[in-house]
Image: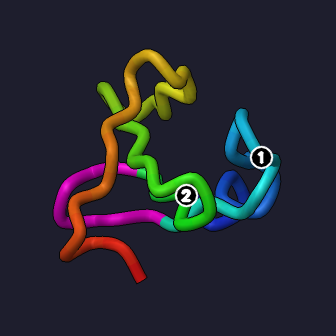
Amino acid sequence: MDHHLLEIIACPICNGKLHFDKKNLELICQTDELAYPISNGIPVLLESHARDLSSLEKK
């Protein structure tokens, strides 16, 4: 994931910072406890495509 892109994109719900999960190819919003998928290198920042973080993933 391009570091410059991570600096300018934000969670579509809270406008908070997203963190890249390299293992699962997802962008994580800890505030909303959601993980947004990355499909073919493109972040899918739609709430309907996000998954809830498991209790183990929450910080």
| Residue 43 picture location, percent across and down | 49, 34
Residue at 27% from the left image edge and 51% from the top image edge: 25
Residue 52 vs 3, above or below: the answer is: above
Residue at 68% from the left image edge and 45% from the top image edge: 11
Residue at 32% from the left image edge and 27% from the top image edge: 39
The residue sitting at the bottom extreme is: 59
**Label annotation for residue 29:** 2
Q: Secondary structure at mark 2?
A: strand
Whether residue 29 is visible: yes
The part of the chain drawn in magenta is 20-26
Residue at 57% from the left image edge and 53% from the top image edge: 32
Give whichever of 17, 32 is nearer the camera. 32
The residue sitting at the top extreme is: 48
* 57 relative to 15 in the view: left or right: left
Crowdedness near tag 2: few (<14), some (14–19) or many (≥20) residues, C-alpha within 10 Å: many
Give whichever of 34, 37 is nearer the camera. 34
Q: Secondary structure at mark 1?
A: loop
Task: Please identify the quadrant where the C terminus is shown.
Answer: bottom left
* Three-letter amino acid code of the residue under disc 1: Cys
* Three-letter amino acid code of the residue under disc 2: Cys
Crowdedness near tag 1: few (<14), some (14–19) or many (≥20) residues, C-alpha within 10 Å: few
Label 2 close to label 1 by CB (< 8 Å): yes
**Label annotation for residue 14:** 1
